[in-house]
Image (tube, rainbow, N blue to C red):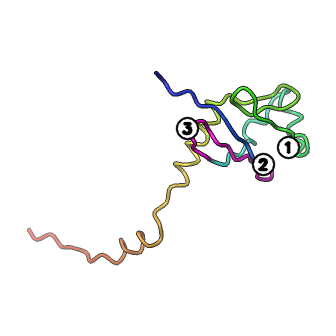
Amino acid sequence: MTFLPSVIRADYRGGFRIHLTFNDLSQRTVDFRPWLEGPVFELLKDPAYFREFFVDGGTVGWPNGADIAPETLYDAAACERKRGVRLPRATAKARLKRPMTRVHH
């Protein structure tokens, strides 16, 4: 059986960003600006209207009927997680301080 993501919580984070919690309990703040194209999303370009979002049917929706598929949101959150992965500073420093080894031929 394939995992079907579902949004179970959404919290406004400023601008056009919403912090999402999915049914696998993963969480991530997603910037919705890339999806604000086309007639159904025109109203969402107004920050006050954008903040009227709600969770319904496992995704984020707005009073005008606009919504984003939960799979799309989950994939966007996964991409954000991948881009956000960095080595902790201590690990990065430790790697820099490691002595170089020479290979003798």
27 versus 41 height, above or below: below
Residue picked out by circle 2: 12
Range drawn in magenta: 13-27
Query: x, y percentage for residue 74?
Result: 60, 36
The quarter of the image holding the C terminus is: bottom left
59 lies left or right of 105: right
Q: Earlier in the sequence, mark 2 or mark 3?
A: 2
Spatial distance from mark 1 to mark 2, Cα to Cα? 7 Å
**Residue type at numbered disc 1:** Arg
95 versus 20 height, above or below: below
Badge 1 vs badge 2, beta-carbon distance below 8 Å: yes
Q: Residue at x 52, y 48 (%)?
A: 82
**Residue type at numbered disc 2:** Tyr
Spatial distance from mark 2 to mark 3, Cα to Cα? 20 Å
**Residue type at numbered disc 3:** Asp
Q: Is residue 69 magenta?
A: no
Secondary structure category for the residue under label 2: strand
Q: Residues within 10 Å of mark 2 (few under 14, many from 20)?
A: some
105 lies left or right of 97: left
18 versus 40 height, above or below: below
**Nearer the observer, 72 or 9:** 9
Query: x, y percentage for residue 62?
Result: 83, 32
Q: Is residue 21 magenta?
A: yes
Q: Residue at x 55, y 54 (%)?
A: 84
Q: Residue at x 18, y 73 (%)?
A: 102
Residue picked out by circle 3: 24
Query: x, y percentage for residue 26?
Result: 57, 44
Badge 3 vs badge 1, beta-carbon distance below 8 Å: no
75 lies left or right of 90: right
Q: Earlier in the sequence, mark 1 or mark 2?
A: 2
Q: Which mark is residue 51?
A: 1
**Nearer the observer, 88 or 42:** 88
